[in-house]
Image (spheres, rainbow, N blue to C red):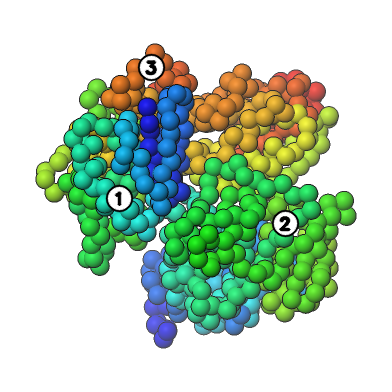
């Protein structure tokens, strides 16, 4: 099993590489491939079970888009095949249709997700988040300069109960197409949400009897949920 | 900017406010400035400023460097305006300037030494031009507020006035490249004899060349991205350092520096590498300001680190070390954890780093902990980590992820319960690591730890 981490030298902000470290604990026999900016992605030529990318700076987003553009068709093919993707924070935006700057200039994205992200670099949004996906409560944090606007009426895959969704007017958070999950949630998401981690591993065909540190992770998760009930 | 009548009204009002707050025993570090800027948004532009302004900015170390500069200048007879009592954002700087202005809006002093929050650059520099500005370093900091180091360096470069002379960290390829057209000198530390590189940090804020994106080759990593590097593809590389620490004699408490004027020695005011950087930054600025080596040396002889950030005491047969570990700042915490691991002996750590004020938004963001080197605490000689506060279980999980044995971790929902949970019989040093926001709580914890140590480890 191959898990590919895209551009970790850039896409490593906000503690989100913790997601990768947790996956390494979950999948000790998997091969984790770190693809650098000047390397060819493993997904281009190999079968991968998960492609992960974390949040990055705005200039890095533009570099990543340029690097991935030649692979846009391959990415689309893998998404259609049901390969699992997890893109957290503003990593999701590179897969969108475009990123718009305050001055109206646009950076064309890869066009896989029906969203346009709008930057507002002088107004940062940061808050705690709670929502629901299927029968799971999802917790996390947001810290971002952008809001995303669906172009095809997508309502997000998490129903927001605390905080905002893809933008301040939406209750839906994240974008899902088949097994591609894009979300603004930081956390790291997989450590903060053991039920979602189990679900994601299930999509990869992995059924663990127990997650690493499951008891302690669930205790932290329960206490976190209690915060929102106060 | 031409002054308005309204400016004078607001100045009088806020000066009266400061006087009233002082009568009530308050420091008036931020509120008067907040009121002034709310009532008169151009207040800072209209306010009188001293003819010479020294600024200190950067992610870590700016309070310490500001204090060092203020101590040395005070010791050399300078009378100056300072915000060293607190308040490094625009409101704090305005408060400090109001205090030092006459009712006619003229500064009472010719010199200011100001700690300037790096994130506040767009609100400060258009109205206030430092003659000398030292930037200690730039790292990722609070994700909520500061986003990332590239964002902050971009803000600073866009807003630092063109006439400001910069004193920059030559071992930091992020802050060292600020405002490239400005005049500058660099401070830094040569690779010291016996120095071990720290290559096990989780975070490297600049791993690829910012010019051509090719990998950077680090010739020496002191910690995180601090060190000497060059690009494998283009000519980008660490600059030549003008004020470099070349040797440290811990026994004699002396450091040696290579400066444009020759070799100079200064008293060590701490044993950490961050203390060396802070000293190098302060010396470089003071020498560029015009003080002689002798003047700076004499003042350093009298200096001590601010008590609220670090203190050490011996109680019974135990050493208690109290240290600020700023939550949400992964680098600052990692530096403290590195200090803990390098301190000899058998150790216990009390960790109370919740930012409880943040819970008003629902729950506290702990994502920063996964960019922080909790791995440094996973050592045989760290016998126990007692975590206090509502987020104790998150930090327990972080320590387990780092590889710590669960038997060494104790969680206490209440911070005040942490001293009683210490297994003092196993250790000779107790570290109390706390945030700036919970110093009152930390003081009570330290007192309880003291009492337990004085009674030979019996619970109080």
Q: Give the alpha-carbon distance from disc 2 to disc 1, as whole Å.
A: 40 Å
Can residue B7 be seen here? Answer: yes
Residue located at (50% from left, 44% from top): B328
Residue denoted by label 1: A68
Q: Chain of mark 2?
A: B
Q: Which mark is residue A208?
A: 3
Q: Quick check: marks 3 and 1 in contact, CB under 8 Å? A: no
Query: Which quadrant of the rendered structure holds the C terminus of chain B?
Result: top right
Q: Give the alpha-carbon distance from disc 3 to disc 2, as whole Å.
A: 48 Å
Could you tell which of marks 3 and 1 lies nearer the N-terminus? 1
Instruction: State the image coordinates of residue A7 (x, y, percent, origin top left).
Output: 40, 47
For the view shown, which residue lies furthest in the bottom direction? B2
Residue denoted by label 2: B191
Query: Which quadrant of the rendered structure holds the N terminus of chain B?
Result: bottom left
Q: Nearer the viewer, mark 2 or mark 1?
A: 1
Q: Nearer the viewer, mark 3 or mark 1?
A: 1
For disc 1, the neighbor class at 10 Å (few under 14, some 14 to 19, many from 20) is many
């Amino acid at each position: 099993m191959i898990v590919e981490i895209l551009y970790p030298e850039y896409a490593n902000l906000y503690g989100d590489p913790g997601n990768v470290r947790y996956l390494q604990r979950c999948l000790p026999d998997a091969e984790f491939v770190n693809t650098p900016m000047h390397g060819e992605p493993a997904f281009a030529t190999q079968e991968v079970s998960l492609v992960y990318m974390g949040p990055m700076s705005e200039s890095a987003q533009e570099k990543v888009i340029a690097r991935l553009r030649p692979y846009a068709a391959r990415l689309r093919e893998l998404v259609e095949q049901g390969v699992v993707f997890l893109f957290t924070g503003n990593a999701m935006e590179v897969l969108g249709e475009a990123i718009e700057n305050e001055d109206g200039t646009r950076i064309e994205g890869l066009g896989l997700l029906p969203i346009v992200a709008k930057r507002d670099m002088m107004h940062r949004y940061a808050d705690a988040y709670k929502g629901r996906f299927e029968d799971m409560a999802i917790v996390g944090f947001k810290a971002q300069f952008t809001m995303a606007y669906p172009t095809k009426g997508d309502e997000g895959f998490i129903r927001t109960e605390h905080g905002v969704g893809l933008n301040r007017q939406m209750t839906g958070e994240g974008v899902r197409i088949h097994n591609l999950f894009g979300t603004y949630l930081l956390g790291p998401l997989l450590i903060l949400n053991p039920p979602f981690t189990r679900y994601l591993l299930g999509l990869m065909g992995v059924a663990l009897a127990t997650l690493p540190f499951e008891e302690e992770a669930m205790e932290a998760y329960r206490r976190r949920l209690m915060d929102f009930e106060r | 900017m031409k002054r308005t009548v309204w400016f004078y009204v607001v100045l009088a009002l806020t000066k009266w406010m400061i006087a009233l707050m002082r009568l009530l025993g308050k420091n008036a570090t931020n509120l008067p400035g907040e009121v002034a800027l709310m009532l008169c948004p151009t207040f800072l532009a209209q306010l009188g400023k001293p003819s010479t302004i020294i600024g200190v900015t950067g992610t870590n170390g700016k309070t310490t460097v500001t204090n060092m500069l203020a101590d040395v200048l005070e010791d050399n007879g300078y009378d100056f305006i300072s915000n060293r009592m607190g308040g490094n954002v625009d409101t704090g700087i305005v408060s400090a300037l109001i205090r030092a202005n006459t009712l006619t809006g003229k500064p009472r002093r010719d010199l200011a030494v100001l700690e300037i929050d790096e994130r506040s650059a767009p609100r400060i520099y258009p109205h206030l031009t430092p003659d000398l500005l030292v930037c200690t370093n730039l790292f990722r900091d609070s994700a909520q507020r500061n986003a990332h180091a590239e964002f902050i360096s971009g803000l600073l470069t866009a807003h630092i006035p063109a006439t400001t002379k910069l004193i920059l960290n030559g071992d930091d390829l992020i802050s060292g490249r600020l405002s490239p057209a400005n005049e500058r000198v660099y401070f830094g530390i040569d690779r010291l004899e016996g120095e071990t590189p720290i290559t096990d940090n989780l975070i490297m804020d600049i791993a690829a060349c910012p010019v051509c994106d090719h990998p950077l080759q680090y010739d020496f990593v002191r910690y995180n991205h601090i060190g000497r590097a060059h690009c494998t593809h283009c000519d980008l590389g660490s600059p030549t350092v003008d004020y470099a620490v070349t040797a440290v004699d811990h026994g004699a408490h002396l450091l040696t520096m290579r400066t444009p004027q020759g070799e100079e020695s200064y008293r060590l005011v701490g044993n950490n590498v961050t203390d060396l950087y802070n000293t190098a930054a302060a010396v470089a600025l003071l020498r560029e300001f015009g003080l002689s080596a002798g003047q700076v040396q004499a003042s350093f002889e009298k200096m001590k680190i601010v008590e609220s950030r670090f203190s050490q005491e011996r109680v019974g047969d135990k050493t208690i070390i109290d240290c600020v570990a700023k939550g949400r700042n992964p680098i600052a915490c990692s530096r403290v954890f590195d200090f803990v691991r390098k301190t000899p002996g058998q150790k216990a750590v009390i960790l109370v780093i919740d930012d409880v004020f943040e819970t008003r938004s629902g729950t506290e963001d702990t994502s920063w902990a996964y960019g922080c080197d909790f791995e440094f605490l996973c050592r045989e000689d760290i016998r126990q980590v007692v975590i206090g506060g509502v987020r104790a279980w998150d930090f327990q999980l972080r320590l387990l992820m780092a590889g710590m044995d669960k038997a060494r971790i104790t969680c206490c929902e209440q911070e005040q319960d942490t001293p009683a949970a210490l297994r003092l019989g196993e250790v000779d040093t107790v570290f109390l690591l706390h945030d700036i926001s919970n110093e009152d709580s930390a003081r009570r914890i330290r007192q309880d730890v003291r009492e337990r140590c004085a009674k030979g480890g019996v619970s109080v």
